[in-house]
Image (cartoon, helix red, strand yellow):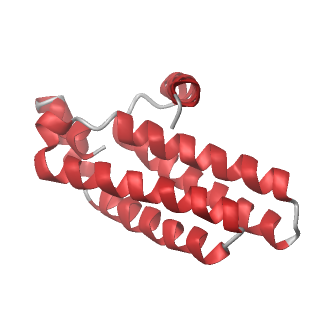
């Protein structure tokens, strides 16, 4: 990934995070919204791919990749330990699959990433109340799982 792209992704994520923070000051909810947005974006990309509207498919995949990059860059690897390391590797894998899915126009690769995102989202939602309580006591806890 080139530095210009990475800087753009960071800026996009920061804008989304800032805008969302105004509406939702709960970091746990923010991550949930980002995961939902990524899943929805891939569903749209699949629809555009099926209709051969490749420029829109590419835009949606790019947006999803930006979300995944944002989640990855905001992992707290020190506090998150092995979980954060595993998520880092999983986010990297998802973005590589999305790049390949875009190049090959392969909906099965998009489905694979959707399934992974749904699995992460399910786990994230399951810890919902516990993460929010822990966040008040120790601000590193929620960040560890992001």
User: With 120 as the anchor, is 37 left or right in this view?
Assistant: right
User: With 53 as the anchor, is 117 left or right in this view?
Assistant: left
Q: Is residue 113 above or below residue 34?
A: below
Q: Position of residue 112 (x, y in %)?
A: 50, 73
The answer to which of 70 and 101 lies nearer the viewer is: 101
Q: Is residue 129 above or below residue 11?
A: below
* Residue at screen point 35% across, 42% down: 28
Q: Position of residue 90 (x, y in %)?
A: 34, 58
From the image, which quarter does the C terminus lie in? top left
* Residue at screen point 47% across, 46% down: 68
State how many labels appear. 0
> Can residue 43 be seen at all in this image of the molecule?
no
Q: Position of residue 140 (x, y in %)?
A: 17, 32
> Can residue 58 be seen at all in this image of the molecule?
yes
User: With 4 as the anchor, is 121 left or right in this view?
Assistant: left
* Residue at screen point 19% across, 38% down: 77
Based on the displayed image, in which of its 4 quarters is residue 142 positioned?
A: top left
* Residue at screen point 72% across, 60% down: 45
The answer to which of 101 and 144 lies nearer the viewer is: 101
**Residue at the outermost front position:** 2
Q: Is residue 71 above or below residue 5?
A: below
**Residue at the outermost bottom position:** 108
Based on the displayed image, in which of its 4 quarters is residue 76 positioned?
A: top left
């Amino acid at each position: 990934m080139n530095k210009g792209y990475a800087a753009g992704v960071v800026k996009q994520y920061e804008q989304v995070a800032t805008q969302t923070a105004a509406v939702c000051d709960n970091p746990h909810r923010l991550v949930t919204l980002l995961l939902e947005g990524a899943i929805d974006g891939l569903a749209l990309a699949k629809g555009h791919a099926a209709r051969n509207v490749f420029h829109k498919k590419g835009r949606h995949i790019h947006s999803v990749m930006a979300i995944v990059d944002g989640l990855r860059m905001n992992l707290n690897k020190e506090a998150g330990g092995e979980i954060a390391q595993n998520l880092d590797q999983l986010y990297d894998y998802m973005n590589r699959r999305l790049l390949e899915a875009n190049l090959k126009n392969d909906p099965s690769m998009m489905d694979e990433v959707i399934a992974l995102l749904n699995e992460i989202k399910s786990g994230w939602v399951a810890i919902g109340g516990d993460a929010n309580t822990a966040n008040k006591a120790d601000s590193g806890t929620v960040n560890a799982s992001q």
